[in-house]
Image (cartoon, helix red, strand yellow):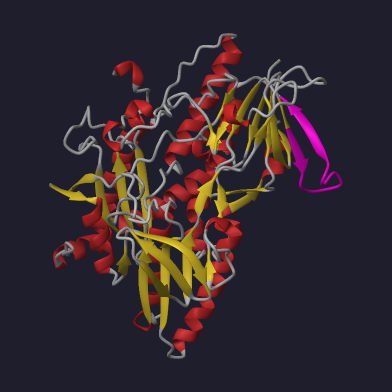
Amino acid sequence: MAKVVIIGAGVSGHTAVSFLRKNLSKQHEVVMISPNSNYQWIPSNIWIGVGRMTEKHTIFPLAPLYKKKKITFIQAKVTTFHPEGDNEINKGFVKAEFVTGNKKGQTIKVDYDYLINATGPKLNFEATEGLLPGTNKVVSVCTYDHALHAWKELDALIQRMRKGEHVKILIGTGHAKATCQGAAFEYILNVESELSRHKVRDKATITWISNEYELGDFGIDNMTMKWGRKLMTGKELGEMVFENQGVKHIKRAGVYKVEDGKAYYETLEGEYKEEEFDFGMLIPSFSGHGFKAFDKEGTDITDKLFKGFMIVDADYTPKPYEEWSVQDWPETYQNPSYKNIFAPGIAFAPPHTISKPRYSPNGTAIFPSPPRTGMPSGITARLVADNISDMINTGTDNITHLGSMGNMGAACIASTGYGILRGGGVSITTYPIVPDYEKYPETGRNLKHTIGRVGLAGHWIKLSLHYAFIWKAKMKPFWWLIPE
Amino acid sequence: MAIKPTKFQHFLMRNPIMQFFTYIYLNIKILKIVRIGHDGTRNKK
């Protein structure tokens, strides 16, 4: 009998736990450790943030589902990793602290045969002074409760606009190395669309602020895509969409401080500027959770497991941008020191960024971190779950499923407005995610599979995916047929 | 200078009938991406 422990019930962790339970017979134990009581479908948070959905559409409680599916659920927060065990337990374990109920505050040791670290990122609001949601007129849509608060603030702003007040809205990235530009891109366009629906669009100046070198970089070093019979770059796409919806933009900006209604940023040219706003949504930087790891004797071995995020089979040798290759990217998500530990999704430490690193004359790094959210999160979680299941079922250590982001496609559907007939979306498919200039020397990507479209169909796709992925997450009949 | 969609392109982007066909096209494109699957890169160097 084997015991597989998964940490984190987000997109990646929940996908992994679902497939492990499906693939493994009931004699094997599957354990989920998560401090959260609910599963949340994060991509729909932007619709909560504009009042078009409520949390009941995007979340559901995990405990009843896990009980029904015979998955052990421990609602606790992991604090330390002990991959060699200690003098009491002769196998790897993690220490976790209960966050709710009678045992709140107590710690538990959870041993494992295989461990999946799918903790996702820590939303590092503290890295930018004054960025905490609910302060200084800034909100967030990173979690459903943040998004609910964002809608409350936006609704109040709309009421002020109805009385004739002109307001400034600032949306984008809140740190020089933030990622997840896609979520901010969706939110700014949805806010714009909602203001039009409420007939107050003329009362707002909407500005995009981002650490991208060019619009449409999205942390994947821009992309050239097929647009009908023509080719279009992400930059052209971004400019077209913003022009069409009357959104101003500031790019190459590293926000470093927020005060009441004022964002301070440094430009790539080294200038220090500021932008005023009445409503701001600035994505924070992501960081690891600061976990510590110890060996059997209690010696700190954090460096063997973590490099901010978890160390996996990537090539972490520092090298210049010109020498980066797809081979640097991990393909098994297995920790090289402890082969029974894996980290799919956002939890793995990337070898480097995907976008070209750029520094201001003051030495400030201003460029996006690499995104690993959405489709790659689900795909990497599934392949890790399949590998572990195979290892348990066959009794071997062979890794048979590989999935590098340099040999993996993704679909990115960005909502630009909600509504069956009034909605819109930017639909992009890209292959591969990390550009491979050896295979595709011109653009780094296969143009047959890297395409873009703008229009109402994008909204329908995003809405279809919302319902499909909630179905899948609830493990309803035939859920496994829905791809990641 | 940003690319500006023509009035006809705007019409196509908003027209539910045309967009229905785009919806089918995009779903096929997404399924193709899924069908290609994923693999490693190192053994193919």
Residue located at (60% from left, 29% from top): A116
Q: Up-down: is A228 above or below A215? A: above
Identify which residue, A308 or A436, lies in the foreground.
A308
Residue A172 versus residue A324 in the image, above or below: below
Q: Nearer the viewer, residue A113 or B26?
A: A113
Q: What's drawn in magenta, residue-wise?
A: A95-111
Quadrant of the image occupied by residue A274: bottom left
Where is the N terminus of chain A found, in terms of image quarters?
top right
Q: Position of residue A337 (x, y in %)?
A: 57, 20
Residue A92 magenta-highlighted: no
Residue for point 50% across, 84% down: A159
Q: Position of residue A204 (x, y in %)?
A: 38, 79
Judge whether residue A69 can be spotted in this image.
Answer: no
Inspect the magenta stretch and tell me whether residue A97 lies in it: yes
Q: Residue at x 23, y 32 (%)?
A: A437
Q: Position of residue A324 (x, y in %)?
A: 31, 32
Q: How many marks?
A: 0
Residue B42 in view: yes
Please provide percent x and percent y for residue A314. Answer: 44, 27
- The picture quadrant where one finds residue B18 is bottom left
Q: Is residue A406 above or below residue A214?
A: above
Q: In the figure, is residue A324 to the left or right of A351?
A: left
Q: Which residue is more in the foreground, A312 or A460? A: A312
